[in-house]
Image (cartoon, helix red, strand yellow):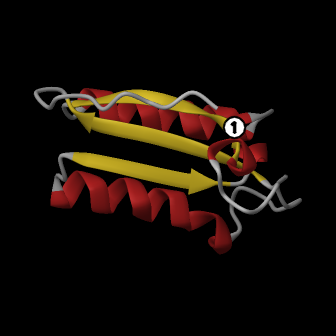
Amino acid sequence: MIGKRKFSDPRNCLISHFRRVVLELEPKYFVMENVPGLALGKHQQLLNDIISEFTANGYQVLSHQVLNAANYGVPRTGKDYLCLGAVKECHYPNIPHP
């Protein structure tokens, strides 16, 4: 789900680097994958802040939820948090149903 790390732990920087890279490179689309625990508890505020920052910089977050990859034909049963975003001017892909 998620480790018992403190927010100040340097290993927690990856999501901030992802945010920085997306905002610097300005891709048309992005997909962020992480552990499902990111969408729970006090970690959810960090996630909400990053989604708000993407929105403020011209992106729309199309979907952000915990999914089981096995429901989409992937040969593994682990759950992952996925966040799909696109520049507001882009055609949005249809997100498949499980």
The one of 50 and 94 positioned closer to us in this rendering: 94
Whole-percent x, y for residue 85 in the image: 35, 38
Position of 11 with respect to 36 (left or right) is: left
Position of 77 with respect to 47 (left or right) is: right
Task: Identify the residue at image location x=85%, y=52%.
Answer: 1
The one of 11 and 63 positioned closer to us in this rendering: 63
Whole-percent x, y for residue 94 in the image: 37, 27
Position of 33 with respect to 70 (left or right) is: left
Position of 35 with respect to 25 (left or right) is: right
Describe the element under mark 1 as helix, strand or loop: strand
Please identify the quadrant where the C terminus is shown.
top right
For this orientation, the residue located farthest to the front is: 73
The picture quadrant where one finds residue 78 is bottom right
Amino acid type of the residue tagged 1 in the rendering: Val
Whole-percent x, y for residue 97 in the image: 57, 27
Task: Identify the residue at image location x=44%, y=33%.
Answer: 51
Circle 1 crowding by C-alpha within 10 Å: few under 14, some 14–19, many from 20: some
Task: Identify the residue at image location x=64%, y=64%.
Answer: 12
For this orientation, the residue located farthest to the bottom is: 10
The picture quadrant where one finds residue 8 is bottom right
For this orientation, the residue located farthest to the left is: 89
The one of 47 and 89 positioned closer to us in this rendering: 89
The picture quadrant where one finds residue 39 is top right
Whole-percent x, y for residue 62 in the image: 39, 27
Which residue, given by chain and number where applicable, does mark 1 sit on?
66
Residue 4 lies, with reference to residue 10, above or below; the image says above
